[in-house]
Amino acid sequence: MNRRHLLALPLLAPGIAAAQPEWRPSRPMRLIIPFAPGGTNDILGRLVADGLSQRLGQPVVVENRGGAGGVLGSDIVAKAPPDGHTLLLGGSGSLVITSFVHQRLPYDPVADFAPIGLFGSGDNVVVVHPGLPVANLRELQAVARRANPPLTFASPGVGSTGHAAGAMIVQALGVEMEHIPYRGTGPVLTDLVAGRVQVFTNALAPMAPQVRAGQLRPIALAGRRRNAALPELPTAAEQGFPEIQAATWFALFATGGSPPAAIAAIHAALHATVNEPEARRRFEEGGVDVELSDSPADFARFYLAERERWGAVVRRGNIRAE
């Protein structure tokens, strides 16, 4: 981390924001969602935007700016005036992994964004085609070591979270698998159910119908704790692979250099929004757990730790965007 990065973090230190006068937006705000409408990011982002609008007293206008794995939308926020009025729905894929798989970015992924708060997370599930004779990661490791030709793992695309998560599993198991990229999760599931690929790692929600029907076999949860939807499924750590931690998380960022008082006010409004029972219900329906950071400083530390962890995975796997 360079000196510019280090200078950005003291603004988020506990106690500093509390000393600032109360901040309120002076005009309508923008929430940039760096993906097309209709997906989980869009659904959660619009829920959060409505809640922020009610609590901050100004409309929060959602703008979907998809493209380049989140780069195009993120760039809008990076270059906006640093006054707290332009927000980004950032995540593990769009802001962390994307920044490593693209060789050149039009922004600095640390200095050009001010972390506000984490609000949701969905641990990934490792699934296999039922024809593969494995029920856990140790068995997958043994089969993969014997396989000739190598087993295949699918992803929604080169440089995606699924690609990086698959590479993480390959590295942790110490095996060889061939990466088969697709254009989205839907095509992956079609070929996985048909047996044309063998292994996939993704959030549970889009795979739940196939798992319930027995068309896919879950063998591990890539998270810190078990999932209420699959209570009998052990985590990767329980199976001896604690380094397999892959979750899709969702958070708010502002433009780097935004006032600490603005960051604190938006963080408080975000907490109040997501803690509403109806919001929690809608999160759970989408397969996402509510996960709130205690403070912007706490989230900043989490963000930097995630960057270090995923950066190592991407470098070892030599993952590059197309």
Image (cartoon, rainbow, N blue to C red):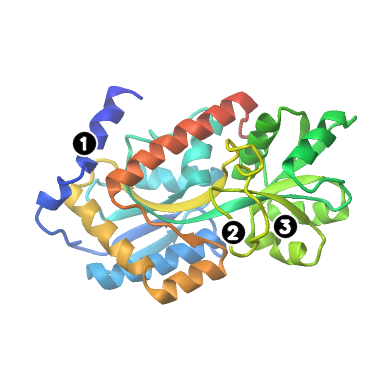
Residue 241 visible in the shown view: yes
Q: Nearer the viewer, residue 269 or 78?
A: 269
Kindly report which numbered mark, 3 or 2, lies closer to the viewer in this rendering. Answer: 2
Q: Mark 2 points at which residue?
A: 227
Label 2: few (<14), some (14–19) or many (≥20) C-alpha neighbours in 10 Å: some
Q: What residue type is labelled 1?
A: Pro
Q: What element carries label 1?
A: helix
Image position of 221 (left or right of 214): left
Label 1: few (<14), some (14–19) or many (≥20) C-alpha neighbours in 10 Å: few
The quarter of the rendered structure image containing the C terminus is: top right
Kindly report which numbered mark, 1 or 2, lies closer to the viewer in this rendering. Answer: 2
Marks 3 and 1 in Cβ contact (< 8 Å): no
Question: Rounded to the nearest whole Å, what is the CA distance between mark 3 and mark 1?
Answer: 43 Å
Q: Which mark is residue 186?
A: 3
Residue 181 visible in the shown view: no
The mark that comes first in sequence, 3 or 2, is 3
Q: What residue type is labelled 2?
A: Asn
Q: In this view, does 95 lie above or below 316?
A: below
Q: Which of 8 and 320 is in front in this view?
A: 8
Q: Is residue 274 above or below residue 93?
A: below
Q: What residue type is labelled 3?
A: Gly
Q: Is residue 286 above or below residue 92?
A: below
The mark that comes first in sequence, 1 or 2, is 1
Q: Report the residue at 61% width, 30% height from top.
A: 320
Q: Mark 1 points at which residue?
A: 10
Residue 218: quarter of image: bottom right
